[in-house]
Image (cartoon, rainbow, N blue to C red):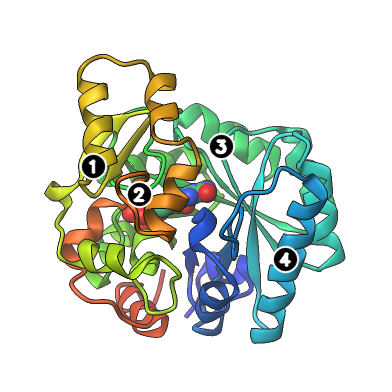
């Protein structure tokens, strides 16, 4: 099989396990990379508590990278902010020191950052949080290797514009010209994989399906609840920077009420314990203090399976010639 995404990433199957903050660790990432995809370590991967120290953050990440390297010889990636904040230079240096081959960037686009990463010989996968023709053209100009088109069906921070996966992929594929596009949002199995390839995507960028794997460190009670849930069971609320979906529960239900009653985005974000709400909900399994975010593909997931089984199901939808 020839596939440009697999070639660029130097992997067998054009499938990326999307960065998922706390929910990633060396075990999940190495399982995906060993199954022929690309695992990606997210922020706070492998951790259970926050640290405000930059040095500690970098050293914790180095240790998780080294654990991945002990468990696989295959390529893997690291989630990196594509803007010049305090973390950018130290994280880039860490990637260079530890020879991490791929940077998965989400959010704003800074052409100088892209250049610095590319100059270091690192492959750039760029996922705008709010995909558009304009940002895609800018990303192509900045020299990214792969662009991810994310539909509103995704889990995590949902795009500001309500454009579903079916509509966003051909739009971004047309704008990206010769740069290959991976699809994100609602892809969990053969059928959904086939659908996005037929729209012009050349790879799969998958979060929710890997959260519901044996190897994922998500709390067992949340896994159990999620496999029993369908897309229409998820509750939906405004927050910063855009929207979130969650399994219902004490805190998520309160956030929906605030959202419906016109509370501001910052009020809702602070009521959801900011970034800690995901750790409390998904890692600790406490929906009285946190939330649990999933994409709309959860309807098709009814059991917890191994990463290798999930990879087989996704890969079954990847055309042999594309
Ligand atoms: C719990 C959760 C946390 C996420 N955290 C991040 C993140 O830290 N960085 C990022 O780029 N994307 C993050 N995402 C979005 C994923 O990278 C990806 O776009 C999304 O999961 C794809 O949609 P799917 O969940 O329907 O497969 C997160 C998604 C989920 C469900």
Residue 283 on image: x %, y %: 43, 60
Identify the residue at image location x=75%, y=58%. 122
Q: Nearer the viewer, mark 2 or mark 4?
A: 2
For mark 2, give the secondary structure. loop
Judge: label 3 CB < 8 Å from ligand 1: yes
Residue 101: image tag: 4
Determine which quarter of the picture holds residue 84: top right
Which quadrant would residue 208 be assigned to in this image? bottom left
- Disc with the residue nearer the chain's start (1 vs 4): 4
Question: Does dot 1 land on a helix, a strand or a loop?
Answer: helix
**Which sits earlier in the primary sequence, circle 3 or circle 1?**
3
Give the spatial CA distance, label 1 vs label 2.
Answer: 20 Å
Residue nearest the viewer, comparing 159 with 192: 159
- The image quadrant that residue 151 belongs to is top left
Closer to viewer: mark 2 or mark 3? 2
User: Foreground: 30 or 235?
Assistant: 235
**Which residue position holds label 1?**
250
Q: Earlier in the sequence, mark 1 or mark 2?
A: 2
Task: Choose mark 1 or mark 2, whichever is in front.
Answer: 1
What element does badge 3 sit on? Answer: loop
Q: Residue at x 40, y 20 (%)?
A: 267
Q: Secondary structure at mark 4?
A: loop
Give the vertical position of 275 relative to 259 (above or below). below
- In 3D space, how far apart are the residues under numbered discs 1 and 4 (Cα atoms)? 41 Å
For label 3, the residue is 107
């Amino acid at each position: 099989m020839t596939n440009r995404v697999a070639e660029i990433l130097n992997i067998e199957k054009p499938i990326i396990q999307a960065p998922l903050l706390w929910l990633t660790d060396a075990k999940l990432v190495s399982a995906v990379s060993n199954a022929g995809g690309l695992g990606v370590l997210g922020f706070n991967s492998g951790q259970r508590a926050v640290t405000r120290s930059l040095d500690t953050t970098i050293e914790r990440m180095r240790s998780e990278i080294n654990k991945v390297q002990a468990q696989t010889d295959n390529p893997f990636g690291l989630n990196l902010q594509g803007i010049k904040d305090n973390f950018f230079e130290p994280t880039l240096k860490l990637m260079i020191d530890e020879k991490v081959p791929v940077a998965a960037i989400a959010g704003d686009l800074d052409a100088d950052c892209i250049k610095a990463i590319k100059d270091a010989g690192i492959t750039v996968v760029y996922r705008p949080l709010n995909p558009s023709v304009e940002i895609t053209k800018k990303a192509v100009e900045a020299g990214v290797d792969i662009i991810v088109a994310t539909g509103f069906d995704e889990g995590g921070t949902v795009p500001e514009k309500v454009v579903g996966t079916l509509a966003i992929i051909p739009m971004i594929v047309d704008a990206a010209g010769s740069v290959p596009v991976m699809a994100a949002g609602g892809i969990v199995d053969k059928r959904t994989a086939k659908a996005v390839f037929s729209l012009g995507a050349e790879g799969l960028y998958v979060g929710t399906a890997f959260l519901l794997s044996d190897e994922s460190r998500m709390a067992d009670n949340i896994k159990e609840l999620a496999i029993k849930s369908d897309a229409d069971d998820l509750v939906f609320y405004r927050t910063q920077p855009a929207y979130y979906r969650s399994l219902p529960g004490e805190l998520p239900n309160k956030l929906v009420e605030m959202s419906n009653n016109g509370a501001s985005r910052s009020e809702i974000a602070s009521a959801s314990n900011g970034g800690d709400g995901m750790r409390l909900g998904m890692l600790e399994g406490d929906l009285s203090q946190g939330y649990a975010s999933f994409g709309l593909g959860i309807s098709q997931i009814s059991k917890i399976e191994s990463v290798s089984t999930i990879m087989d199901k996704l890969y079954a939808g990847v055309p042999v010639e594309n």
